[in-house]
Image (cartoon, rainbow, N blue to C red):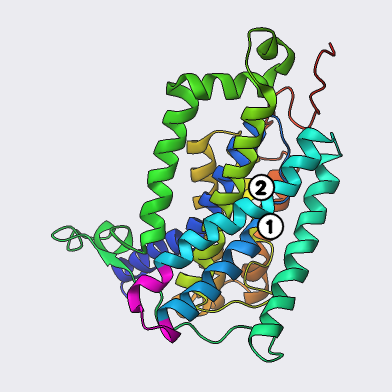
Amino acid sequence: MTWTVFLDTVLNNTLVFATPLILAALGGVISERAGVVNIALEGFMIMGAFGAAITAFYLGDEMGLGALGPWFGLIAAFLLGMLFAVPHAVASIHFRADQVVSGVAINFLAAGFSIFMVKILFEGSAQTKTIQNTFTKVQIPGLTDIPIIGKGILMSYPTTYIAVALVIFLYYLLYRTGFGLRLRAIGEHPHAAASVGISVYYYRYIAVLLAGGFAGIGGAGMSTAISNNFSHNTIAGQGFMALAAMIFGKWHPVGAMWAALFFGFANALAANGQVLGLTKYVPAEFLNMLPFVLTILALAGVVGKAVAPAADGRPYVKGQR
């Protein structure tokens, strides 16, 4: 393997594995910028992966919609992620429940519900049938011949381009619009924001629901572009890695993207270590645990102190100071 092929492979696989993390981490950013802790990213990703796989299989393969199947799956994943965000939003915002406990409950509910439905729909099987019509990599005409970055970066799944677009969109929304200013204000000091007429409940509901939708799309990327089916281990901790990427990226859309790319690079090395010949120098077991070790280091604050929004995780009580 030449060094250019090596770089192409590593860069491309980094994008493949980073894309679901970027999308879910963006969900975490908008939720926690509004002051709601979102441990439930794992559950939203599970429901997104499940919804996308089911929709792509039945609409794309069984009903003959072909290549449109995964696109409908993406829409279903967004809506299902938002639907499962509703109980977390109501419990956290309206009933002022412990946001961590609520998020953990959503994770367990999503894992159990998705496998239960898969067993019903696929005659007791623990996984869906393989999806025939999935996302394929899109080449940008005239640019894929550029050395290294051409095939490494500019030939990716549609979900990767969607992730980059959402990073730009969320950055603009949070830092260049009045909506973003108000949303960040309630994540720092909700009572001050409420004193000037900003509805804390409204903005927090919007943020949590969008978080569910973004993470759902991230899960869809796993089932319709990487694994081509859905089973109990399709997500396998990716939601928690996205949470770590959000913290590593200091609750900023662009920072979260770079952190997700870092974890995606570790995943790419682990998944392709043998193909790339890395296992001659590093034990395969070490490569496999590398993404999780990096996640623990990021959450432990080894990579640098990260300061969360001041009101993150603190329920808002109207009229209370």
* Residue 262: mark in rendering: none
Q: Secondary structure at mark 2?
A: helix
> At 52% from the left edge and 68% from the top edge, which residue is drawn?
52
Split into 4 quadrants, where in the image is the N terminus?
Answer: bottom left
Which is more toward the observer, 44 or 58?
Answer: 58
Q: Which residue is mark 1?
A: 42
Work out whether 37 lies above or below 101: above
- Where residue 309 appears, x then y in whole percent? 68, 26
Q: Residue furthest left?
A: 142
> At 71% from the left edge and 43% from the top edge, which residue is drawn?
38
Which is more toward the observer, 207 or 297?
Answer: 207
- Where residue 267 appears, x then y in whole percent? 56, 64
- Where residue 275 appears, x then y in whole percent? 46, 80
> At 63% from the left edge and 7% from the top edge, which residue is drawn?
196
Split into 4 quadrants, where in the image is the C terminus?
Answer: top right
Specify the amino acid type for callout 1. Glu
Q: Secondary structure at mark 1?
A: helix
Marks 1,2: beta carbons within 8 A = yes
Image: magenta residue range: 61-70
Q: Which residue is mark 2?
A: 243
